[in-house]
Image (cartoon, rainbow, N blue to C red):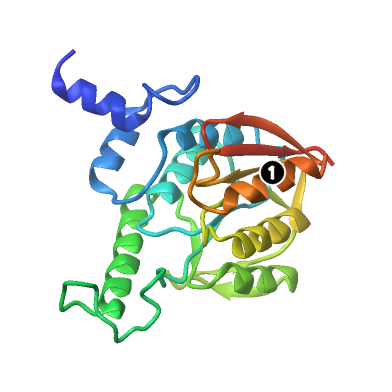
Amino acid sequence: MNTVKKIIRRLSGSENQKKGEPYQFISWLRFANAGMLDNGNIYCFEYAIKNLPSNNPVIEIGSFCGLSTNLISFYLQKFSKTNKLITCDKWIFEGAENPDGKLEGSELKNKEYKDFVKDTYIRNISFFSKHNLPYTFEQFSDELFELWENKKVETDVLGRTVQLGGPISFAYIDGNHEYDFAKKDFEHVDKFLEPGGFILFDDSADDSNWDVKKVVREVQETGRYELIVKNPNYLFKKIK
């Protein structure tokens, strides 16, 4: 196998993801779209979206430069799903909360980095998901779910309005991975996730350094969720 094909197999996740079919689009997307993504998540996206219980919205908490957003959008289109994709990110990163602070070892200010990442996200979704654009809100997840609960009509970062609220069919939780934040994200999602809907927790593997792995143990203990796969992150299906 030549070098290019090896790289495509690795980037598409075909060597690591369980039962996942590689698509060249994913390889080229990952060449161009910055982001941190475990290959196993690709199979989880594919499984959850292929088996969505309804056309209710899909939620992504944490978008960064849009890699996972574009993958979710890709699978929605591939499986001819009509679910809206709603995402949120404040683009304020750990250790960079002070907008006038500088990136360590650089003259770049935190705000400059934030603006660059946000602009990169918008450019990436506008190109790779132009046939199935997500609705993205520059908000923390708590803020988004307050709007969701109150069924607000809101304007996203591309200037489009959308009605929020109602049941959710799939949620990808990839926000702050500390315990209190990840637990709150689960509680918000759990309130609206319909029976048969899915949750994928990023960085929840058993050997993860993040507290979100404690949250997935608590999800299992509720008895209301079925573990679909640990790949190595946890994908659950709500059963009641």
Q: In which quarter of the image is the C terminus?
A: top right
Residue occupying the point 46% across, 23% down: 20
Residue 203: horizontal and vertical position, in percent? 50, 46
Residue occupying the point 66% across, 45% down: 216
Image quadrant in which you'd find residue 28: top left
Q: Residue tagged by mark 1?
A: 217
Residue occupying the point 35% across, 63% down: 122
Residue 236: horizontal and vertical position, in percent? 67, 38
Image quadrant in which you'd find residue 102: bottom left
Q: Indicate whether 41 appears above or below 119.
A: above
Q: Indicate whether 205 appears above or below 15.
A: below
Q: Nearer the viewer, residue 104 or 161?
A: 104
Q: Please, what secondary structure does the residue beneath circle 1 have?
A: helix
Q: Is residue 238 left or right of residue 52?
A: right
Q: Nearer the viewer, residue 92 or 155?
A: 92
Q: Indicate whether 226 appears above or below 99.
A: above
Q: Is residue 108 left or right of residue 198?
A: left
Q: Indicate whether 171 appears above or below 119.
A: above
**What's the amino acid at mark 1?**
Arg
Residue 84, visible in the rendered structure: no
Taking the view exactly as shown, the residue that stands out farthest to the bottom is 100
Taking the view exactly as shown, the residue that stands out farthest to the top is 1
Residue 127, visible in the rendered structure: yes
Say how many tags the image has. 1
Q: Nearer the viewer, residue 1 or 130?
A: 1
Residue 70: horizontal and vertical position, in percent? 41, 47
